[in-house]
Image (cartoon, rainbow, N blue to C red):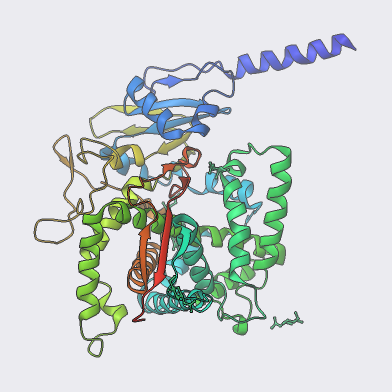
């Protein structure tokens, strides 16, 4: 018996030594396997990816390969060379890794799914007339929820206290949910607050689900919360009377045509809830937080919104006037530069020679992953953005008030100078809807509410470093705010 166990252990040790034997060839990026066999840098990566990648960048430069939980990941940090990655979907595949994550996070497999068809449908549903229609519904829902909150107050002149993150996330999530997944605020239907509460629990486990690092107890919680969300979302987008958006109904239709069963369809609903709601609330939070802690920026945004609200609404409805807001747009872009930190990951499906902008060439091995992390560069690169840690609301504005798009690194004009929305064929299709929603939210909040920090000297909260790589960051801690409704509205 004892010999069997010893042999088994020996076997495992040999396997680990053998499997971590990979060595770097001359033509490959610098290789850093870390000290722990197989696991490599997984722990440090998961704890604070930004810090880890920065450390590796100091050690190896703009391209290097690290071992992470048995996989080899090549990280590229030179934004001048990002095009080489984004424009070769044949060697550098998006879908495979996306499918791995989909299975881990949502327990969802769509084997016969055609991403190109879905993409085309999404693009259409989030642009042109459909977009205008969605934006108008979103505006209505936001207004409705604010009024509801006001009516729920006994004494309307009293100050309410709240925390800015949950205030922003909850309001935008519920409005977005009602706009895309459910029509009316009707008693008989799912209360959007229930969906929000469950979703937040899910959100807190999301990074661990993606990394498969849940503890047994968390695993049970995750299963439970997911089950509950699947049930809440089960009727979404079914039938004319569901009140869901045309987008969701088209999506359901697509799944049905592909022969996807009911259970899997529900799971896909949660995937879409995450894709459409997971980043908007946190982004709106960061923007408002930066505005509240930067009075000059707040003044500039208020001034722009005031001039819009004073224009004649008979000639042009508010929503049409709310499109040209260069100051707001710059402030949002700046907030996202500081807080949007997705990884852009591709799987190397055939051996590939990567040509960098500086003329160097590197071989990539099949089966490895390639990862861009635009948060480090371009977004926080001091060569591109002066004082990158600071929020400057007018960073993306020219002297004449137009949008600034000229940014340079090493004398080269950059195509990618900030990338909160990803890029290439897999960039965010909901970008315009997201920007419009956040703009409406900030506008409504500033006009319906007197909103201030409880502590006027309060500083921006720290970020939760475990979320690097998963879209818009979230704070660790929050900002205490107080607000009351203005009389005139
Ligand atoms: C501030 C808010 C948002 C941010 C920062 C954001 C960011 C992103 C990023 C970075 C990607 C690319 C993922 C990748 O390359 O792996 C993406 C994809 C996507 N986004 Fe957004 N997004 C936001 C809001 C929205 C909204 C409101 C919608 C829809 C209503 C939406 C729909 C999508 C969809 C459907 C995809 C998948 C595209 C594909 O699979 O090819 N997003 N988003
Ligand atoms: C509402 O609150 C304000 C300020 O706290 C107070 O002055 C006022 O008397 C209250 N009104 C009612 C009806 O309770
Ligand atoms: C409304 O609620 C009742 C009881 O909860 C339920 O039987 C009925 O199916 C619901 N109707 C709709 C349209 O959801
Ligand atoms: C940080 O984020 C992780 C994953 O979303 C979550 O589980 C954890 O509770 C967060 N930590 C704090 C202090 O908010």
Which residue is at 62% across, 44% downward?
209
Q: Is residue 333 above or below residue 210?
A: below
Which quadrant: the C terminus? bottom left
Residue sticking out furthest to the bottom:
314
Q: Position of residue 467 (x, y in %)?
A: 49, 42
Q: Is residue 456 above or below residue 173?
A: above
Viewer-proximal residue among 194 and 30: 194
What is the x, y in percent for residue 30? 39, 21
> Along the horizontal axis of the image, is 474 left or right of 396?
right
Instruction: Say how many tags the image has.
Output: 0
Check the image and name the residue furthest to the left. 400
Which quadrant holds the N terminus? top right
Residue in the picture at 52% in, 33% down: 46
Residue 140: tell me if it is visible: yes
Q: Is residue 261 visible?
A: no
- Residue 389 higher or lower than 153, as above or below: above
Closer to the camera in the image, 185 or 433 = 185
In the image, 278: left or right of 194?
Answer: left
Q: Quadrant of ligand 1?
A: bottom left
Left or right of 467 in this view: 483: left
Q: Is residue 177 above or below residue 203?
A: below
- Please state which of residues 269 and 398 is positioned toward the viewer in this rendering: 398
Residue beneath the point at 21% across and 68% down: 304
Instruction: Compare residues 380 and 66 and report the one nearer the observer.
Output: 380
Q: Residue at x 30, y 42 (%)?
A: 379
Q: Position of residue 182 (x, y in %)?
A: 57, 75
């Amino acid at each position: 018996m004892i010999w069997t166990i010893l042999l088994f252990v020996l076997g495992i040790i040999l396997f680990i030594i053998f499997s971590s034997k990979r060595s770097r060839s001359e033509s490959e990026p610098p290789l850093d396997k870390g000290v722990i066999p197989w696991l490599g840098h997984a722990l440090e990566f998961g704890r604070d990816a930004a810090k880890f990648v920065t450390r590796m960048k100091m050690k190896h430069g703009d391209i290097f390969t690290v071992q992470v939980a048995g996989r080899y990941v090549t990280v590229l940090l030179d934004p001048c060379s990002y095009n080489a990655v984004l424009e070769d979907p044949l060697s550098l595949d998006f879908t495979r890794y996306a499918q791995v994550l989909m299975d881990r996070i949502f327990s969802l497999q769509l084997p016969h799914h055609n991403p190109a068809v879905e993409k085309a449908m999404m693009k259409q549903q989030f642009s042109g007339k459909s977009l205008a229609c969605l934006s108008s519904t979103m505006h209505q829902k936001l207004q409705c929820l604010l009024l509801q909150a006001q009516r729920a107050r006994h004494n309307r002149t009293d100050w309410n206290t709240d925390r800015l993150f949950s205030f922003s996330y909850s309001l935008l999530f519920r409005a977005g949910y009602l706009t895309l997944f459910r029509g009316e605020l009707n008693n008989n239907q799912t209360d959007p607050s229930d969906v929000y509460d469950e979703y937040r629990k899910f959100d807190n486990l999301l990074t661990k689900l993606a990394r498969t690092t849940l503890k047994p107890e968390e695993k049970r919680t995750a299963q439970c919360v997911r089950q509950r969300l699947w049930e809440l979302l089960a009727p979404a987008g079914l039938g004319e009377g569901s009140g869901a958006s045309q987008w969701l109904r088209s999506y359901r239709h697509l799944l049905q045509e592909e022969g996807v069963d009911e259970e899997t369809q529900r799971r896909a609903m949660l995937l879409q809830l995450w894709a459409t709601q997971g980043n908007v609330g946190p982004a709106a939070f960061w923007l408002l937080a930066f505005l509240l802690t930067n009075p000059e920026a707040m003044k500039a945004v208020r001034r722009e919104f005031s001039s819009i609200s004073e224009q004649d609404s008979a000639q042009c409805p508010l929503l049409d006037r709310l499109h040209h807001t260069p100051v707001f747009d710059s402030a949002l872009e700046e907030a996202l530069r500081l807080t949007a930190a997705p990884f852009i990951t591709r799987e190397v499906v055939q051996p590939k020679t990567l040509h960098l902008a500086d003329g160097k060439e590197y071989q990539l091995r099949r089966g490895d992953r390639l990862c861009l992390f635009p948060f480090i560069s371009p977004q926080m690169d001091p060569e591109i953005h002066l004082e990158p840690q600071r929020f400057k609301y007018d960073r993306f504005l020219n002297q004449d008030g137009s949008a600034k798009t000229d940014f340079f690194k090493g004398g080269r004009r950059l195509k990618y100078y900030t990338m909160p929305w990803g890029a290439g064929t897999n960039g965010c299709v909901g970008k315009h809807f997201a920007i419009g929603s956040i703009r409406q939210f900030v506008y409504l909040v500033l006009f319906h509410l007197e909103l201030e920090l409880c502590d006027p000297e309060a500083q921006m909260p720290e970020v939760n470093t475990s979320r690097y790589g998963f879209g818009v960051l979230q704070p660790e801690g929050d900002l205490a705010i107080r607000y009351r409704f203005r009389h005139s509205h």
